[in-house]
Amino acid sequence: MSDPALLAVDWGTTALRGALLAADGTVLAEHAAPRGLLSIPPGGWADAFDAEFGAWRAAYPGLPCLMAGMVGSRQGWVEAAYCPCPAGAADLATQLLWVQPGRVAIVPGLSTEQGGLPDVMRGEETQVVGALQLLGLAEAESVNLVLPGTHSKWVTVRSGRITGFATHLTGECYALLRQQSILARTLPADDAAWVPEAFDRGVAQARQPGGLLHHLFSVRTLALFDRLDAAGLACYLSGLVIGEELRAQLAAHLPLAEVAAAQPVVLIGSAALTARYQRALAAWSVPTQVLGAEATWFGLAALAGTLRG
């Protein structure tokens, strides 16, 4: 293996991932562990970092390391202040928080504000930078991105800079309803079964008058009248909450005409989740492109390149 140019780390709430990267973002080696923020005791971040990546650092003395994600949160290793939008790769690079000067740094999150309400992200900004690099859109006039997850992010980029974003608690809402509401009693133990027509029905229902709080009760009534089986109900619920996210975002913040006329919406995330969003967006006639975990690595490589430049 050729010598790497960067140790890249994506350190989140429940897990961490690391990679040795070439200067162009090519992955030379990867490492993952279930050692996220929730498992690190106070004051234990440096020890956890050495335990997971000490062998690589010993093998490549002086190798710089960039970290993104919840490692820079208030409960993380060190809190990295949010960088206000609009912001691009150069802004993030100049506001890196150096945990070990010249060697280990944390990428700051981003903040924005709309209607007097602040919004924030950590980790997604690095994925956006990577996506723009991967797709050759770093200088594009307009790009719209969606990063599905526990807290989904809808991001607007203009000429290579993130100008704003909106967060939706879609994944968290689904999990709470799925596990702790009255609806949970009619749902299966896991989400292994995929019933696409039930998901589509939920997405379509979310566009009907009444609102999410009304539509959610139909999960219960469809079960009471044996209109959907347990697996179908789970997919229908997923369609409802994702459909509500799309309805709210496309109607209020990102008009459909603008999306259809511009660059396809870029989806970044796990294959299973981006497939659902791709299917839901297709129901709105919105074209999409999909990227996975590679966006983070290319984003960190791009930030490292900005420093070298």
Image (cartoon, rainbow, N blue to C red):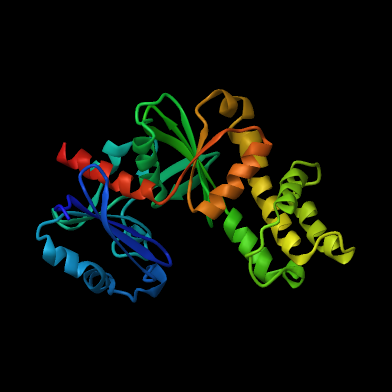
Q: Residue 250 falls in which quadrant of the image?
A: top right
Q: Is residue 255 left or right of residue 152?
A: right
Q: At 21% from the left edge and 39% from the top edge, which residue is drawn? A: 306
Q: Is residue 294 above or below residue 155?
A: below
Give how far across and how far down residue 105 sits, in percent.
22, 54
Q: In the image as oriented, which residue stretches furthest toward the front?
A: 1
Residue 1 visible? The answer is yes
Quarter of the image where the N terminus is located: bottom left
Quarter of the image where the C terminus is located: top left
Closest to the observer, 245 or 56: 56
Give how far across and how far down residue 128 sits, in percent.
40, 42
Give how far across and how far down residue 65 sits, in percent.
21, 55
Closest to the observer, 121 or 28: 28
Give how far across and how far down residue 196 sits, in percent.
70, 51
Q: In the image as oriented, which residue stretches furthest toward the bottom?
A: 41
Q: Is residue 279 above or below residue 69?
A: above
Q: Is residue 16 above or below residue 307?
A: below
Q: In the image as oriented, which residue stretches furthest toward the left?
A: 61
Q: Residue 194 falls in which quadrant of the image?
A: bottom right
Q: At 39% from the left edge and 38% from the top edge, which residue is drawn? A: 85
